Image (cartoon, rainbow, N blue to C red):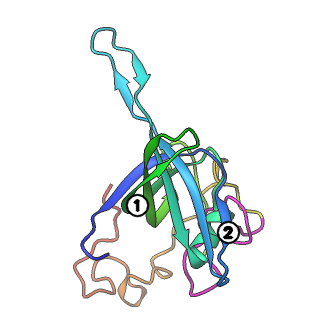
Amino acid sequence: MAGEPLVTVVGNLVADPEARVSQAGKSWVTFRIASTPRVRDRQSGDWSDGEPLWLGCRAYGEYADNIAASLTKGMRVIVQGRLTQRSYTDNQGQQRTSLDLEVEEVGPSLRFATAQVSRGQARGQVGGFGGGGSAQPAGQPSWGQPAAAPQQPQTQQDNPWTSSGQGGSGGGFGGGFDDEQPF
């Protein structure tokens, strides 16, 4: 629906994504994440786990295929989507409420891991992040493993953002840009 706010959550996958196919032949995937805040006790200075937030997540179509091929249990991810709430009765007859995310974006958290992104086959979309499936190029490191040494930066003549290979400022967007990294 239009106007619904997007929510961003960082958490760990608690199980492998479950890929499914509808009766109409459309693919979709469900997965669950747990986001557990760290809480510091001011008296002792010790850190402890806070109350975890459990979220069910859903994605559809080719996006679902990319998620199923790329994510596995335990991976730390950043998920953005539309928060939904549903009520149900559990097996013991208790009324429960579940929070779910209709996924708009998902990606690896690079705080404690590295990732190798490769383009998907259809429409040139970004596909998996090095974790498996056909989106992983041969010889590339898996997500969570140390990456190979970075490639050498492009030379001034290879840089498409500078005007006619001359280097300096005056890049391909009308000038005024410096080639130096801002950090």
Considering the numbered disc 1 on the image, is that residue within a helix, a strand or a loop? strand
Near mark 1 (Cα within 10 A), the count class, few <14, some 14-19 or many ≥20, is some
Q: Between 62 and 133, which is closer to the camera in this rendering? A: 62
Q: Between 63 and 181, which is closer to the camera in this rendering? A: 63
Residue at the spot 42% in from the left edge and 21% down from the top edge:
48
Based on the displayed image, in which of its 4 quarters is residue 65 positioned? bottom right
The numbered dot on residue 70 is none
Mark closest to the chain's N terminus, 1 or 2: 2
- Determine which residue is flagged by label 1: 80
In the rendered image, the vertical position of residue 51 relative to residue 5, given as above or below: above
Magenta stretch, overall SS: loop
The type of residue carrying mark 1 is Gln
Say left or right for 149 vs 173: right
Position of residue 97 measured from the top left corner of the image (x, y, whole percent): 41, 47
The numbered dot on residue 20 is 2
89 magenta-colored: no
Residue located farthest toward the bottom when viewing the structure as drawn: 164
Residue at the spot 47% in from the left edge and 51% down from the top edge:
88
Residue at the spot 67% in from the left edge and 80% down from the top edge:
23
The residue mark sitting in front, 1 or 2, is 2
Specify the quadrant that holds the N terminus. Answer: bottom left
Residue located farthest toward the front when viewing the structure as drawn: 93
Position of residue 2 measured from the top left corner of the image (x, y, whole percent): 28, 77
128 magenta-colored: yes
Task: Give the residues drawn in magenta, as a range.
Answer: 120-138
The type of residue carrying mark 2 is Arg
Near mark 2 (Cα within 10 A), the count class, few <14, some 14-19 or many ≥20, is some
In the rendered image, the vertical position of residue 9 relative to residue 40, given as above or below: below
Position of residue 66 measured from the top left corner of the image (x, y, whole percent): 62, 70
